[in-house]
Image (cartoon, rainbow, N blue to C red):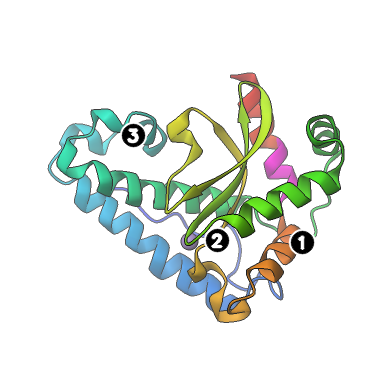
Amino acid sequence: MKHELTPLPYEYNALEPYIDEQTMRIHHDKHHQTYVDKLNAALEPYAGLQKVPIETLLQSLNTIPEQSRNAVRNHGGGVLNHNQFWNIMKKDVPITHKMTEVINHAFGSFDVFKKQFTDASLNRFGSGWAWLVVSNGKLEIVSTANQDTPWSEGKHPILMIDIWEHAYYLKYQNKRAEYVENFFKVINWEEVERLYLEAVKK
Ligand code: MN
């Protein structure tokens, strides 16, 4: 069974003007598709692993034969991270009461949370992601390089931003800070809350 590219949950222009249509087309149809294709290629020799959910593969990278481990880590991460990323974006979704409450509890205020998440995004050198995760029942901000995911460290991502240049360069060029600022206008807080509730239930 091959992994397939999940369709975007909205139109390519749904996040305009903050994330432009052309970026979404290239990001989803080309970059995300390439991660899917390369993950399938990496799993080609292992019929048994092809059925394993990507989260599980990334939580147990040691079980992947060594010659394919890096490819699964990079491309499996690329597939999973983008699947989650599309889902946690939507325009005009105000933050929910529940998420306001848990963010205030963890960080003191929304502004402190936003500053820390922004710093994690801006301080990640090169390509990677910044994340809000649930770790042992608590909220935590982390960043990862390349397509590495906090899943591999047993953490449960609930909000993430792609800070590879392919995610913003066409519209924002070198202005990563402006991209991160505008990302806050397209967070689907209802989905973030759903992921949070799922994470704390475990
Ligand atoms: Mn990307």
Most common secondary structure along the magenta stretch: helix
Give the left or right position of residue 86, taking residue 33 as reference: right
* Alpha carbon distance from label 3 to label 2: 23 Å
First reached walking from the N terminus: tag 2 or tag 1 = 2
Label 1 or label 3, whichever comes before in sequence order: 3
SS at mark 3 in the image: helix
Q: Tell me which amino acid carries mark 2.
A: Ile
The magenta segment is: 188-193
Instruction: Specify whether residue 1 is in view.
Output: no
Residue 159 visible somewhere in the drawing: yes
**Residue 168 position in % (x across, y down):** 57, 71
Q: Residues within 10 Å of mark 3 (few under 14, many from 20)?
A: many
Residue furthest left as drawn: 45
- State which quarter of the image contains the N terminus: top left
- Residue 179 figure quarter: bottom right
Could you tell me which residue is drawn at 69 percent across and 49 percent down? 117
Residue at left 48%, top 68%? 27
Give me the residue at 66% from left, 56% from top.
89
Question: Residue at label 3?
Answer: 57
Q: Amino acid at mark 1?
A: Lys
Which-is-in-front pick, marks 3 and 2?
2
Q: On the image, numbered disc 1 is attached to which residue? A: 185
Q: CA distance from mark 2 to mark 1?
A: 16 Å
